[in-house]
Image (spheres, rainbow, N blue to C red):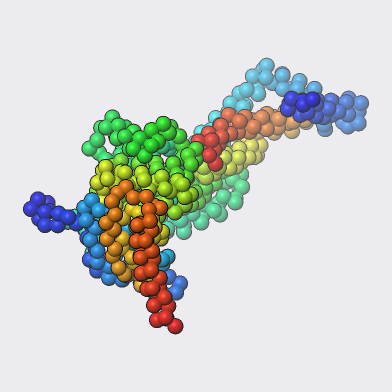
Amino acid sequence: MKLPRFVIPTLVAVTFLGGWEWFVRVGHVNDVLVPAPSQILHWFWDSLLNGELLSATWVTMRRLIIGFAIGAALGVPLGALCARVRWIRDTLGVLALGLQTLPSVCWVPLALLWFGQEESALLFVVVMGTIWAVVIAVQESVLNVQPLYLRAAMTMGSKGWHLWLRVILPAALPGVLSGMKQGWAFAWRSLMAAEIFVVILTGFGLGSLLHAGRELLRMDQVMGVMTVVVLVGLLADLIFFAPLERWLRRSRGL
Amino acid sequence: MNPASYKTHPSAALTLRNVTKRFNGAAGCVTALDDITLDVKEGEFLVLVGPSGCGKSTLLSLLAGLDQVDEGAIRLGEEPVRSPGRDRLVMFQQDALFPWLNALENVMFGLRLKPDLTEAERLESARYYLSLVGLADKEKARPHELSGGMRQRVALARSLAPNPRVLLMDEPFSALDALTRDQLYRDIQDIFTKRKKTIVLVTHNIREAVCLGDRVVLLSPNPGRVRQIFDINLPRPRRINDPELASLAAEVTDALSSHLSRSQEGLA
């Protein structure tokens, strides 16, 4: 007999969480240091009811989405420019490659000085996390577009903007998408680090909630926020990136 | 343009005068084409054959305007050829269909670049050419859902639909299996007689050249030169297995190999 696919993962999860709950309840570990799943769930329920969790998630998601959108919107044309013009590739392209390796939380001190403890400081950090990965991905995937497509399009009279919008960008799309995915991951990490690192007066995000948990010695809150962070990341992939990738693969037979 | 001057070369679609092309490679400067002079008549099916390295694909790139001559001149009618243009469309060795568009959209691509047509006219024309290559029922299919032969047919429809003055074909049959190829030979001849296009085909397959061409131009390598021109006066449609065609192909092959062995003696 063949079990449905969800049976084994469910059993594993139940066993793991049950074991954890039991381990804490019988007193093998201090429940201040390692809270039981039921305590985390309890915090989760309470903060959901008093609105704290939803408002923090909203603040964080808004920063992430706006910052990511700005980073991607700037990164795509800059990456295309890097691919098109050699001296820009030799300057901005190299700079992008370097800055991509810099964890963008390193921008936080500068951002605070430049923008103050406000939304714009965190947006800046998210943009810096997104933009370089997108620039590099767009540059590389544009440079790797099959010359045959360009030759075919040019003989049919395509040039300039038409060539870019109808041939080069569609041909580069799979690479651009994976660059955006990487940019999203970088932005998410840097935003969390920044929110934990500094108090932003204009909004209390998930990172601040986690940091508050640490200061109050509420490890149920810390682990609860961590769970939410994981879920948000999973959902972004499930709702946004995975369907796009699936559509690309299916429509092009990749 | 003055219509009177247009009529001075009514029969020549493409004229090549002393065309020379050199490449700077690792081995120094290589002359790919040396002093090629050739006329392609309006409505003629001209085939360029020769061993690899004779510059036949380079010559096609020059005709397409994808590459520039170093010396000499190429004209389409009265106009010098310097850049790619819709009047000379190319069918490549690989189909070069865009994977993000379906068959119909691929054929529409070139038509959408013609500003003087309405969208309805474009659609009608695209459907007409898809049915001409026998793929009327595949218009929604993506390239990856089509076989190699079908993809080349879509590519053929895409090159024909904008109604170019000249169709340039760069070994478009070489990657196909023998059965598909034979079918495409029939289709191309059918379309050629129906539409009376000027076609320049590049191939290394001599049997294919004799089967399709009104004239077969034999090029020799190092440097690429016109070696000999054969007039093929067989009635159409021609079958690739026709004995008369086979004996003509043998004649061309002999001319090619005698020249190759002579040039090797020269080297020794």
Residue drawn at (53%, 39%) of the image: A253
x and y, in percent, of residue A193 in the image: 64, 40
Quadrant of image for the C terminus of chain A: top right
Could one spot residue A141 in this view of the protein? yes
- Give B138 or B249, whichever is nearer the viewer: B249
x and y, in percent, of residue A86 in the image: 42, 58
Residue drawn at (42%, 48%) of the image: B182
- Give A236 or A218, whichever is nearer the viewer: A236
Count of residue discs: 0
- Give B130 or B240, whichever is nearer the viewer: B240
Residue B141 lies left or right of residue A60; in this view the side is left
Spot the residue most to the top.
A49
Vertical placement of B206 versus B192: above or below?
below
x and y, in percent, of residue A20 in the image: 84, 29
Residue B170 lies left or right of residue A138; in this view the side is left
Vertical placement of A60 versus B25: above or below?
above
- Give A67 or A233, whichever is nearer the viewer: A233
Vertical placement of B60 versus A59: above or below?
below
x and y, in percent, of residue B219 in the image: 34, 67
